[in-house]
Amino acid sequence: MVGYLYHTGARGRVRLESYSVRGLTVLSARLPGTAERRGDRRRTARALRLLGRAGCRRLLAPCALDPALPVVHTGHLWQAMAVPLALAALRQRGIAPERAVLALRGDRPTRPYRQACLRLARQVRALCLQLEGGETLGWQLQRQLGVPLLPAEEAALTLSFCPGERPEGACLCLGGEDPAVDGFTLDLPGLALPPGCPALPLLAALLDAGRLPLEEVQVLPLAPRLSAACPEIPSLPEIPRQSAPR
């Protein structure tokens, strides 16, 4: 059972609403007012107490009032979707997977890292393993699947499983508890979200509960963000005021 806080924008009292999403119970603590004007801390504290008494053990979004509460993280969801995410990123760049060299970077050979290597080895031209002690895995890929291993300089795209790494160039960072994957989001067609429910944490909670078939999840591109270093727009000359006719 998971829960979240939801500001309704209306007057009233704190109350709970229960939803069933693919068999997973999701509790919504509805608070009056808006997120910008949350009112006093007692309402938020009361909402958290109601969620706890109802059996909620994890929140879908962190709460500043009680940061110690367990939160549903999305990192394992992104890593589980590493293969379709890489293929979508290659298509977005106009590169056919069978002609692409893909680099996979990790700090250790985790299960998601190994699964991504084994699955991508069948779909791309070559791989580059940027992994300390990855000789055994590289030998397995070459011997069993016949996939060539090339230097990182030839990679058209890098998938990083390293926590805390910031994207540079053509790199998708999937490491850490809640990675910010630039340019993409995940969606489950036909999934009806409760009002105000954060989508990605809910998908991660469904995955934890064994109620999310990964083959049904879609990787969707996001609209490109505006660069922070935009050229400054020159100011227009001031128009002199004209006196009103008498």
Image (spheres, helix red, strand yellow):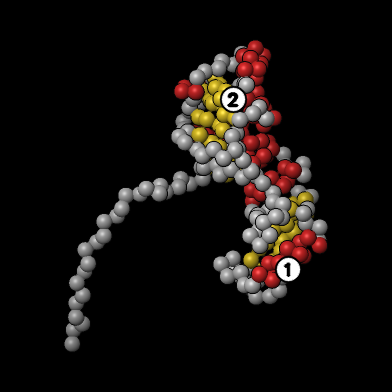
Occupied quadrant, residue 109? top right
Horizontal relation, residue 222 to residue 242: left or right: right
Work out which quarter of the rendered image holds the C terminus and state it: bottom left
> Does residue 76 sit above or below 17 in this rendering?
above
Question: Would you say residue 206 is visible in this rendering?
Answer: yes
Horizontal relation, residue 209 to residue 237: left or right: right
Residue position for label 1: 46
> Does residue 219 sit above or below 148 in this rendering?
below
Bin the neighbour count of mark 2 within 10 Å (Cα to Cα): few under 14, some 14-19, many 20 and up.
some
Question: Which of these two is toward me, 48 or 96?
Answer: 48
Disc sitting over residue 117 in the figure: none
Q: Residue at x 31, y 53 (%)?
A: 232
Mark 1 falls on what kind of element?
helix
Bin the neighbour count of mark 1 within 10 Å (Cα to Cα): few under 14, some 14-19, many 20 and up.
some
Give the x, y percent position of residue 154: 47, 22
Q: Sequence order check: which comes first, mark 1 or mark 2?
A: 1
Horizontal relation, residue 160 to residue 54: left or right: left
Residue position for label 2: 131
Q: State how far apart marks 1 and 2 are (Cα).
A: 47 Å
Residue type, mark 1 in image: Arg
Tell me, yes or no, whether the two marked residues, 1 and 2, touch with CB atoms within 8 Å: no
Give the x, y percent position of residue 111: 69, 30
Residue type, mark 2 in image: Leu
> Does residue 23 sit above or below 78 in this rendering?
below
Give the x, y percent position of residue 164: 57, 40
